[in-house]
């Protein structure tokens, strides 16, 4: 029997977190284009290697979420990426959802696809070295009208079905019900929506007999909407985020990781540090860390620009930000 609880808890070693390097082909293409890098399978591989091949990342990373194509790619060291990560004590995982589509009952909202054929894909990913997985749902706030209860329940059911399949396959599921930062909403509205999202999610997980002790929750911080004109202090973010989690996440959950969700690298670092400090003050029952993508990559990508001669400087920028985010987890 695989010790899923032990694996889940191993992500929360002091000062370590998870790099989300799981952009789909479409997202990676758009991300690279924004830095003037032409898209191709080889450029995506070099993009992955820029981060996964950086020296000493094992001091700050316990896991990396990969996109499915990356499981089969080699780094510049001629090792498959999962093999290279494992050799440095970093757990490889994989995004297993197949993206979103408009929800027929509420076309301005989204549901996530990927349950059809999931058991077969999980067996294949496990053979390729993945020890954990991730599934993302997208929750949009628009005034008092969105999210709709139907969309919250449908996304929760899909997250629960996914989690059950992953545990059955002997891997750890990360559940990411992302409440989007985009919008004009207040921080109070964000707090109410994240609370409702989590309350429904854990109720449905119980219905599906998902083992809480071997799931990891990947959640948004409680923030005012990006178009609200309000800039929250790290202390405000920490207070509301921890209050929301304490009220809605069972203490048995193995740990919570935060997504950066449209924050700048500095904002996501400062907010994480404030959350970690607040969690200590109130003796939160679960360990907390990061699972960032853009907040860790942005500065490095602006240096790299797809050019081999820029790799050392880009990696230095990445490692500098990674060290700051790692320190933030200690509060």
Image (spheres, rainbow, N blue to C red):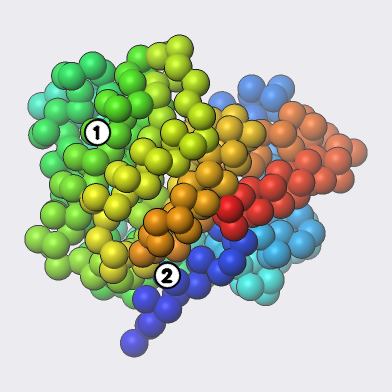
Mark linked to residue 133: none
Q: Distance between the residues labelled 2 and 1?
A: 26 Å
Closer to the eye: label 2 or 1? 1
Seen from the viewer's position, the closer of residues 121 and 181 is: 181
The residue singled out by tag 1 in the image is 193
Secondary structure found at label 1: helix
| Label 2 crowd bin: few (<14), some (14–19), many (20+), radius 10 Å | many
Q: In which quarter of the image is residue 88?
A: bottom right
Vertical placement of residue 85 versus 245, above or below: below
Q: Nearer the viewer, residue 13 or 19?
A: 13
From the viewer's side, name the closer residue of 28 and 225: 225
x, y percentage for residue 158?
20, 49
Report whether residue 212 is seen.
yes
Q: Is residue 276 left or right of residue 193?
A: right
- Quarter containing the N terminus: bottom left
Disc 2 target residue: 8
Q: Nearer the viewer, residue 200 or 330?
A: 330
Lateral position of residue 80 relative to residue 185, left or right: right
Q: In this view, does 275 lie to the left or right of 141?
A: right
Q: Residue 223, relative to residue 256: is it above or below? A: above
Q: In the image, residue 72 lies at what x, y percent? A: 57, 59
Say which residue appears at 23% left-offset and 16% top-offset: 143
Which one is earlier in the sequence, the residue at label 2 or at label 1? 2
Residue farthest toward the front in the current orientation of the protein: 281
Note whether residue 221 is visible.
no
Q: Which residue is drawn at 18% across and 19% down?
A: 144
Residue 260 screen position, x and y as percent: 51, 38
State the image coordinates of residue 172 (x, y, percent, origin top left): 38, 67
Q: Which residue is rendered at x = 79% and y = 32% of the image?
A: 303
């Amino acid at each position: 029997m695989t010790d899923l609880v032990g694996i889940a808890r191993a992500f929360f070693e002091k000062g370590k977190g998870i790099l989300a390097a799981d952009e789909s082909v479409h997202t990676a293409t758009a991300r690279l284009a924004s830095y003037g890098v032409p898209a191709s399978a080889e450029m995506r591989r070099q993009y992955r290697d820029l981060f996964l091949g950086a020296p000493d990342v094992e001091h700050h990373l316990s896991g990396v979420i990969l996109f499915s194509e990356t499981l089969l790619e080699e780094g510049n060291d001629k090792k498959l990426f999962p093999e290279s990560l494992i050799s440095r004590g970093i757990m490889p995982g994989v995004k297993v959802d197949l993206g979103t589509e408009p929800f027929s009952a509420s076309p301005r909202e989204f549901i996530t696809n990927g349950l059809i054929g999931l058991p077969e894909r999980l067996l294949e990913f496990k053979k390729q070295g993945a020890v954990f997985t991730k599934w993302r749902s997208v929750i949009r706030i628009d005034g008092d009208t969105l999210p709709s209860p139907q969309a919250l329940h449908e996304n929760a059911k899909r997250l629960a079905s996914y989690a059950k399949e992953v545990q059955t396959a002997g891997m750890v599921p990360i559940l990411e019900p992302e409440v989007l930062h985009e919008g004009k909403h207040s921080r109070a509205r964000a707090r109410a929506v994240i609370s409702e999202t989590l309350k429904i999610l854990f109720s449905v997980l119980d219905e599906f007999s998902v083992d809480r002790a071997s799931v990891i929750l990947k959640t948004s911080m409680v923030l005012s909407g990006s178009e609200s004109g309000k800039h929250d202090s790290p202390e405000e973010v920490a207070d509301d985020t921890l209050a929301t989690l304490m009220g809605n996440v069972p203490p048995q959950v193995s740990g919570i990781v935060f997504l950066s969700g449209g924050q700048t690298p500095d904002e996501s670092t400062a907010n994480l540090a404030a959350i970690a400090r607040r969690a200590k003050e109130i003796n939160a029952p679960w360990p907390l860390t990061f699972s960032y993508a853009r907040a860790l990559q942005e500065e490095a990508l602006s240096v790299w620009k797809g050019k081999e001669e820029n790799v050392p400087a880009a990696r230095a920028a990445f490692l500098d930000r990674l060290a700051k985010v790692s320190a933030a987890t200690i509060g």
